[in-house]
Amino acid sequence: MDCSVPLSQPPAFLKPIPVPAMVDYDEAQAILSALADALDGPQIDIIPLAQANGRILAENVSATTPRPEADISAMDGYAFCCADIPTNGAHSISLPLQDCIVAGDQPSTHNRSTAATILTGARIPLGADCVIARERVTMGDGVIHLNTADALVGKNIRRAGEEFPVGHPLLKVGQKLDWRHISLLASQNIKHLAVYKPYRIGVLANGAELASDAPDYRADINTPMLCAMLESMGLHVQHHTVGSDSQAELRDSVNELAAQSDIIITTGGISVGQTDNVLPVMEQLGACCLFRRVKIRPGKPFTLMRQAETPVFCLPGNPGAAAICTQIFVLPFLRSISGTNPQQAASPTLSGRSSFAFSSPSDATCLIPVHYAQSGKEGVFSLVPSQGASDVLCFSHASGILRIPAGQTIKVGDWCAAMALSAV
Amino acid sequence: MDCSVPLSQPPAFLKPIPVPAMVDYDEAQAILSALADALDGPQIDIIPLAQANGRILAENVSATTPRPEADISAMDGYAFCCADIPTNGAHSISLPLQDCIVAGDQPSTHNRSTAATILTGARIPLGADCVIARERVTMGDGVIHLNTADALVGKNIRRAGEEFPVGHPLLKVGQKLDWRHISLLASQNIKHLAVYKPYRIGVLANGAELASDAPDYRADINTPMLCAMLESMGLHVQHHTVGSDSQAELRDSVNELAAQSDIIITTGGISVGQTDNVLPVMEQLGACCLFRRVKIRPGKPFTLMRQAETPVFCLPGNPGAAAICTQIFVLPFLRSISGTNPQQAASPTLSGRSSFAFSSPSDATCLIPVHYAQSGKEGVFSLVPSQGASDVLCFSHASGILRIPAGQTIKVGDWCAAMALSAV
């Protein structure tokens, strides 16, 4: 089999984009973008508010209840009607005290020429139009004495709808929900809401060296690493490890995962060696290849396929390369189809000056893990020593990935933008 | 009861710090810091690696296995011994081919004057010291022809321990684990590890207006909001809502939560009105008050207590004030006692120029929600319109909280640092 060419023609929807045997970074991203557009959007879940943290809102939410819900007192004090205050120049007045109104009460109409004790957040009785703070009055025997200058219509009253009225747009489809949005939803007494269903991701590692009884056993780094990345995004992950170089076993595992997954990610077995079984197995399963290898370093073997409706990301087995391909291609793709609004779906970036010089070769875009730190008012990128495609230690010192296009150079002091590494 | 003074003397461990009736921002943080130091550290959980994402490592981890584990081939090619290459000036040589070595094999000793097919990641057989890439040779009948200039000892061989040797320190106690660390742990074939146990937080809202049958019912905003904040930190949260102004019911709920919680957070009922039951109930339960109100705006009623060993954060009921107190005081406190290393426990900050002027009054530190955006190479803060203590809508437009100490002013263009709001 010649693995350097696509297994089959690209599907119709991708026809406008040429799919060469090997693509460059921009072509790979364009093909992923077209694939994202061609997929059905995420499904919708109706969930209780208590489970909404971190989910993506699938409906617009406008206010059905204003805030405040009614005219309420802004402090502990006394409610009265300013029309009861004499305009004859008297400096003070005494008003007999009524019952206390507390938050939760539905007070009866205010009795003119009296004052009602009222607590913070309690509803202003109909007919009262001013609240005087507790510390501004003196108490007599069942009466309060207040300064007439303190009587101002609306004083210490928070008006219904002052924060937002009924109909005010609160949240938009595609909002990733955190406490800032949960509080707004709670203010509307929303008990259930529509959110997008997270995709089910199948992660599949393969290679005889991963079998626990292999003569030269290697621990599977990629599966726990990818599961952590994907679960941090709120995705549902299932994983298989095929500890053999058997195409039949790999095929069975792909089939099993495909039945339970919306998207499959494989690691290993995608180079051109005799035990690189992913491509032949996917061919047997009738998959089509959207691109075969990318002109990047590390990560060149990265291949994108589609089996029926299921996108299949075929990552290199070297964990450093697998991590970079996932950060640069897979996670942004998954965010773009998650239902998140495009602004929030964009990968977070770090910007600052480079403290090092770097030149990419003419035939590969380099993707280099970088450390980022604030130095005065500017961010500064520094190189993280790395052994290349297999290195995982480098990431624990890195905060971003700097992309240097093929044939381009950055100099010390150049202003750069890096993609922030995903974290918990 | 006079609620403006502490309920009792501060406990001995806090004696060096004066605990006035009302503290300023710095005093409040100092008392919280002393309280954090006085608490027992978090307990330890032993958990499987698959559950470690987001947890905090409770042990140092050094390499017990080097990476690479052995000398391995960096590519698909052919392994041979450079000593077999003639030094008589010949430009090429033919070597008969041996069996193929794949990753997972434990190859037997290399037969001199032959070449072994070897795949990426496979172990170099003893006696071979060079790998030539597949594409650099021509194939004959059971032999390869290679250029003698390509024979260099160590070429295309990744040496055992090249990324890190046995004994190399990999991770330190207090590291919050994400995929970058999970991959390192997986490389060591670690199946279980020690992490800090998350604290159990009891959240308790109180007020008659929260009862679903209250004549002037109000939805409980604080509980879902706080649960979202705390759960995003990986904490275990239980919550009660006491929908009454009954001290007995509040006392029962505090007792019930205290039995199941390491830390309690109450909202509402901490001002000085007749239905502000939190302080009298805590007094009945024998709690001591570490500070009573803070000179901040919003959030002045914020009070810190300790009942037996349990810290009790008493937040205002106004959700805007409760949110700000939690972001500024409670979450940083919880991070500081979580076992996370101090660098990671520090609240993330945003820095940039202010696009607005603001003066704090002489008697209160102002805590204002701000929007943050990149403008060219600098961050810029802008004001988020806010109605004050009760406002929750403002947070959905904010990304940080700017603290302006009492009596201080910021001018347009001043360089500022804000605390980033916590998110998912």
Image: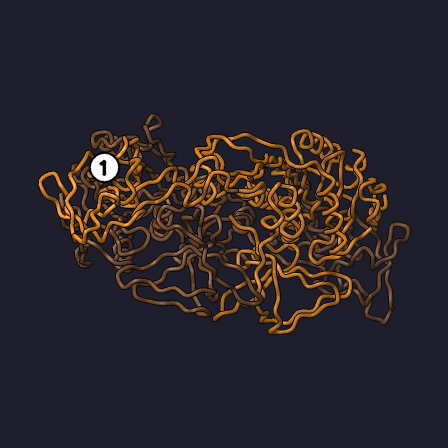
Chain colours: A orange, B brown
Residue closer to the observer: B200 or B248? B248
Say left or right for B23 vs A35.
left
Residue A125: tell me if it is visible. yes
Residue ranking furthest to the front = A88
Position above or below: B85 against A266: below
Say left or right for B364 vs A56.
left
Density class for disc 1 (Cα within 10 Å; few <14, some 14-19, many ≥20) is: some
Residue B141, position as x, y percentages in the image = 90, 50
Residue B417, position as x, y percentages in the image = 43, 63
The N terminus of chain A, quarter of image: top right
Q: Residue at x 58, y 49 (%)?
A: A344
Residue ranking furthest to the bottom = A412
Residue closer to the observer: A346 or A174? A174
Residue B306: tell me if it is visible. no
Determine the secondary structure under disc 1: loop
Residue A180, position as x, y percentages in the image = 45, 45
Residue closer to the observer: A61 or A131? A131
Residue ranking furthest to the left = A141
Question: Circle 1 marks a residue in which chain?
Answer: A
Residue closer to the observer: B352 or A363? B352
Three-letter residue code for mark 1 = Arg
- The residue singled out by tag 1 in the image is A112
Instruction: Give the mark count.
Output: 1
Residue A379, position as x, y percentages in the image = 53, 67
Q: Quadrant of residue B77?
A: bottom right
Residue ranking furthest to the top = B213
